Image (cartoon, coloured by chain):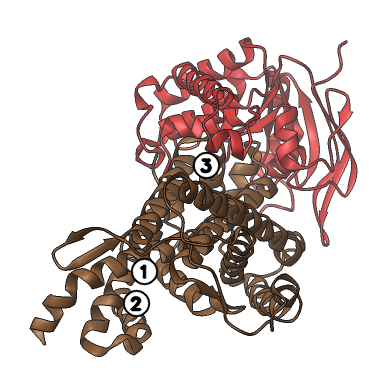
Amino acid sequence: MLDEFLNQFLPSTVGGLVVGSIYALVALGYTMVYGVLRLINFAHSEIFMIGTFTSLVVITAIAPASPLTGFALFGVMLLLILLSAAISGGAAMLLEVVAYRPLRKKGATRLTALISAIGASLFLQELFALVVIPWLTGKAGRNQQSSPRLVDRDTVFTIGNAAVRTDHIIVVVAAVVMMVALDRLVNRTRIGRGIRATAQDPEAAVLMGVSIDNIVRVTFLLGGAMAGVAGALYLMEFENTVYNVGFVLGIKAFTAAVLGGIGNLRGALVGGVVLGLIENWGAIFLGSEWKDVIAFTVLVVVLMFRPTGILGESLQKARA
Amino acid sequence: MSTPVLQLDNVTMRFGGVVALREAKISINPGEIFALIGPNGAGKTTVFNVVTGVYQPTEGQVLFNGTRIDGTKRFKITKLGIARTFQNIRLFHNMSALENVMVGADSHHKTGAIGATLNLPWHRKEEKRGRELARELLDFVGIPGRMTETAKNLPYGDQRRLEIARALATDPKLLLLDEPAAGMNPAEKEALQALIRKIRDSGRTVLLIEHDMSLVMGVSDRVAVLDFGQLIAEGLPHEVQTNPRVIEAYLGVSEDAS
């Protein structure tokens, strides 16, 4: 058993980092919206799904005859990421205007907004299954859609017995770049100060000239864009998607956000990576069908000892 | 006579059956330090909330430099040039002092999300200007050494000063101070008086709510007294001080005494 674990440890670690990066990117959206509005945006998982389909459409349109390399690969990846970020970010803003803003204006309770979020989530899934996916792909909306291979599974280097492939590197590097950019934006710019001020005291922020509507809009845009990037990376890595691809992944990302400390951007990163690693390590012992059980057991255990999550501190408390 | 900076024109504010403010008429001239006093629950903070757009008056109008502002969005009122501090300090507790002030300065900046993300030159210039302004203001209110400290770690008196600096960063023509001396020791109160005068001398108008009578009498040009939502007196500090109705309201010599 131990032998097997040691044998599988490094490959599992690589796999865990890759999937953890994707969790982390999606988790950022949950955590930002929660920080500003105290709302769990359950439809965020569908924003991720929209990102995967945007990428699917782009890859299919480009239709590479063989996997790409070098500058062509870089260019196409950049295009995928930018387009998915733009479409997902736009969709998230639209979602806010349609599903949340009217409730906020009328002073609805948080529970009402939560129900609206669940409704929006199911609505988007069904809309894609029944209308959008058949229209985009010409195939049945509830089937798995697979994507052409974009990146070769070449080993770039090895660590012990773990092969680190091109696609692994793309996922991790892209995720890190996005997260660093977001962190800088939140901690060093006017928009970020507005977001943090609103998270700490919305009333005082308004009276200092911060427009809450603008801040909420930007928050959804940024969170959505991160989910879009995650969607692009997911499709490149796993090469398939489906109308409810966001469901389990969304819950995992939400778990990652809570695990790291909801409302905390760096917590989302830590939570995503920790969750990805633990479920992959645990799978060595129990088999990969136990991944989800392991993930959620860890969540419950961590929260018993640290109810505010690993980093605990929230967006309100993020320092410059 | 020039246009008043702020004019409350028969403003009534009702919450259900409760009348928090009854046909209030206040007119504040440019460059004045105007104090609003009265017993607890007299409606002073309601005046602030009506002026800053938190409440919409049930009746009457609020005019700022001759333009109606009741019904205007709150953040826009700030941009027009009205800023305030809070009775119970409401800083962004986990930001540094400098950042708190920068949030105020940001109200006049224009870069959007894209400019900020890409850190375009225009955004960088605004950031630099905001930081410089914030430094100057911390210096102006007398806490230049506190720049990098987290707001919640500042001593109480400094937090009050920081709130004033943050409000000044929005470049207000009218500054509303809600009990700025609360919790201050005599030395701090004296420094606060000097600061309020300095703010006026820098070309701003100040509307002050305060319980501390020595401060009010020492610094105000004019004083208005509210009692049960009604203005019962207005005038020079010493006139108000000797007004029998004011004394009655404060000492509670009527059947309302309890």
Contact (CB < 8 A) between labels 2 and 1? yes
Residue A192 tag number: 3
Q: Is residue A260 visible?
A: no
Q: Is residue A162 visible?
A: yes
| Left-right relation of A19 to B246 | left
Q: Earlier in the sequence, mark 1 or mark 3?
A: 3
Q: Amino acid at mark 3?
A: Gly
Q: Colour of chain B?
A: red
| Left-right relation of B208 to B150 | right
Q: Quadrant of the N terminus of chain A?
A: bottom left
Chain for disc number 3:
A
The chain drawn in brown is A
Chain for disc number 1:
A
Q: What residue did someone put label 1 on?
A: A259
Judging depth in this view, the residue of B141 and A270 nearest the camera is A270
Q: What residue did someone put label 2 on?
A: A299
